[in-house]
Amino acid sequence: QEVSGSIPLSSTKIQTLASAGVFAFPGLKKICEADKNPLIFIHIYPFVKLLINIRTFLVWGTCFAQLINIRSCGYHYVSSRNVLQIIMMLKINASAKKFLLALILSLISIPLARLLSPGMGIDDNNLYLAWLPLSVILSMLLLFGRHAVVPLFLAFALTNIWLLPLPFPQSLVLLVCQLFAPVLACEVLRWRLGPRWRFGLSNGHMGWRIFWACFFAPLMMKGAMYLAGHFLHFPVSVSGFFVPTSVMYSLVDIQSLISAALIFTLLFYYPLRMILNPRYASAFWRRHIRPAFARQQWLFTLNWIIALAFLLFILCAPFDSEYIAGYLVPVIFILFFLVINRFSYPLICLLWGICAFLLVAYNRNFLQGVNTEYALSFVLSVLISFTICMLHMSQIQGRSNRIKRKLHSQALQDPLTGLPNLRAFESYLENHPQASVCCLRMDNLEFLSRHYGMMMRVHCKRMVTQALQPLLGREERLFQLPGSELLLVLHGSETAARLSYIVDFLNSQTFCWQGDSLDLEFGAAWGVIEGEGEALHHTLGQLSWLSEQACAARRVLALNNSLATVSDNTTERVLQLSRVKKALAEGGLRLYAQPIVSESGDRYHEILARMVWDGKVITPDQFIPVIAQFNLSKRFDLLVVETLFRAMKDLPGERFSVNLMPFTLMQKESANKIIALFKQYEISPAMVVLEITEQQAFSSSEISMLNIRRLREYGCSIAIDDYGTGYANYERLKILEADIVKIDGCFVRDILTDRVDAMIVKSICELARVKNLTLVAEFVETEAQRDLLYKMGVDYLQGYLMGKPRPIEDMLAEQQA
């Protein structure tokens, strides 16, 4: 009862029948009769005994026998859907399954191709314009490879027996002539191109495929038939294919085979492949058809289809017109040349195959005036030549498109980390405008990369990406940022909680590089980005700054809650940098001089720098951090020295001290450039004291120490500024290479009331006296401080008591007066 209705045969039932080798003919008959959509019928007697006698094909032979027509029981029909369904459900080896599928498709396609093969009569001779069974042969070999040889042999044998009743020797020779040349051509292609010769038809080696499959195989096939006709006698009905009547008729026969192989092979290949694999049909739609109707070119595609359909309708119409034949045929070629750079190679091949078939099958207008074999040969030559040109141009265009896609993909990807870059991030935001963007910072990655190298940084980013992948959703992405940061895009409303968990998770992980465990610390900031272009990059800059603060605060910060603070800090810093650069470039530097006086009245002046921008004075506490952060120290110090030397030309006999910033002496050639300024302005080095910080004086940097030593050798006095606040101790004072020590004001301010400060200053004075160092005390504001410091042995004093800083222009004015 289960198999008597329209319910499809279950896999369990098929396995049972196949394993037992039992034929349920009454039930099978009911199944066949239940399918009211007959598509095919298959004869059993010519080959069922062959299949059953081969033990390895017992299973598929058993089930196949249920689907074929049994002559003694009458004809029963089954649908192709049921045939393929039963074959796919069989648990047999892959070779047998390919054999079955190839056999069924061959039995259907070959008679259909013979029926559809277009032809025409000239001088009482019936000629093929394209012998389509050759197209089927090549398409089956492309689909199944060597597994299609035996099915093609069986299918052609049955078709020849059915349509061409020949004696056995002639039938066998005809079968060899039909199949040997295409199979040999495909074997040569496999030998030359490798095991994957059947794949990537549009990607390369087109010349090899066209020569062997589309020229060598037809020529060899026709040559073999003429050779067989020379030794064997064939009936009059088919003798024209084996005995050449004239050179031109033979040429037309060969051209019909070439056109079938060249133009119509893919017309069978793609539909058969879609039947075998419905997923390929879906992929063909997505890759080749849907892009043709994309938003940018759907109007062009629609107009092109309308124009092509109109031309085909006129050319295939059942009336004759010399004007149509003479002027409209070239327009078909022009239409296909127009879409070479718009349509893909498979789509062009399929469309051209359909158009060419309609033109040669309904050829009253297309072949208008073609009355001789010479004219027909010319028309076929034009079709073949145009097809080769079109395929070649389409392949070149396809290769160009693939290169463009590859370059575009590379432009959106960081080559080292493999992560999408900022360009990809901008494209991503176009489709996800309200996503939460998180800036993930590895706080000490830059410091570690100085020791381990830059590839360690790349490795860490790869490891972080790999660790985060299980925590991300389908639409969530990581993007590469330069430096020590990554961009993370999250979706949903719990962004802060998820990001906090991610940061805690990463901080708990151990990342290694070449066997060493890396001490990485993570922090993050997040926000919803609105806008694009400059607004987008401005927001990313704010997120970067905020993530740096998050690392210090050990917590996740939200840009939405800190937007005003972030904007104020980042914007003010950038504006300050712009002001400093403009002041340096446009002469906005102003020098002030503060006196440093000894007990005997000897004095010199310390130079203090100010900047003027837009009429406003910028104090050192505003511009010095910017200069240090953006590596402008050397440029700034050299400008201060040069400005001072210009003024000293008009202040003969005056001594000055000038500060050098820490990063200036850490750069090569700094000392040489300062010495060059001494020589350029003819300033004696004895008239200038160069003040450096403790960090420079006690630095382990070889470059800094070489620069200091070079300046001392030239004759400059070196002063240690703000001594006692940082690196100084008695051991370092013992080995100090300097001429002047300036005691920091923090020890002078409370020297009258704080005994510790007084003892520190006294000890520094005693050690300096032993080292023959000159002592200068800063921040002296009262006479009591002055008297005590002179009594302790301090040589020079500096502070408001001695004099406030004043513009160096005032000194010039006094000198001139």
Image: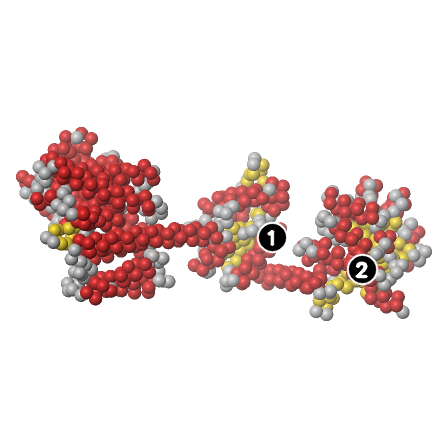
> Are dots 2 and 1 in contact, CB under 8 Å?
no
Disc 1 crowd rating (10 Å Cα; few below 14, some 14-19, many 20+) is: many
Q: Quadrant of residue 573?
A: bottom right
Question: In the rendered structure, which amino acid carries the disc numbered 1?
Answer: Glu
Pick the front one: 440 or 345:
345
User: Label 2, label 1: how many angstroms apart (C-alpha)?
Assistant: 39 Å
Residue lying at 89% horizontally and 45% vertically, measured from the top left: 772
Q: Give the x, y percent position of residue 652.
A: 88, 60
Q: Give the x, y percent position of residue 543.
A: 56, 56
Residue lying at 82% horizontally and 62% vertically, measured from the top left: 647
Question: In the rendered structure, which amino acid carries the disc numbered 2?
Answer: Leu
Tag nearer the camera, 2 or 1: 2
Q: Quadrant of the N terminus?
A: top left
Badge number at residue 644: 2
Residue underneath mark 1? 548
Q: Give the x, y percent position of residue 78.
A: 13, 46
Residue 297, placed above or below residue 277: below
SS type, badge 1: helix
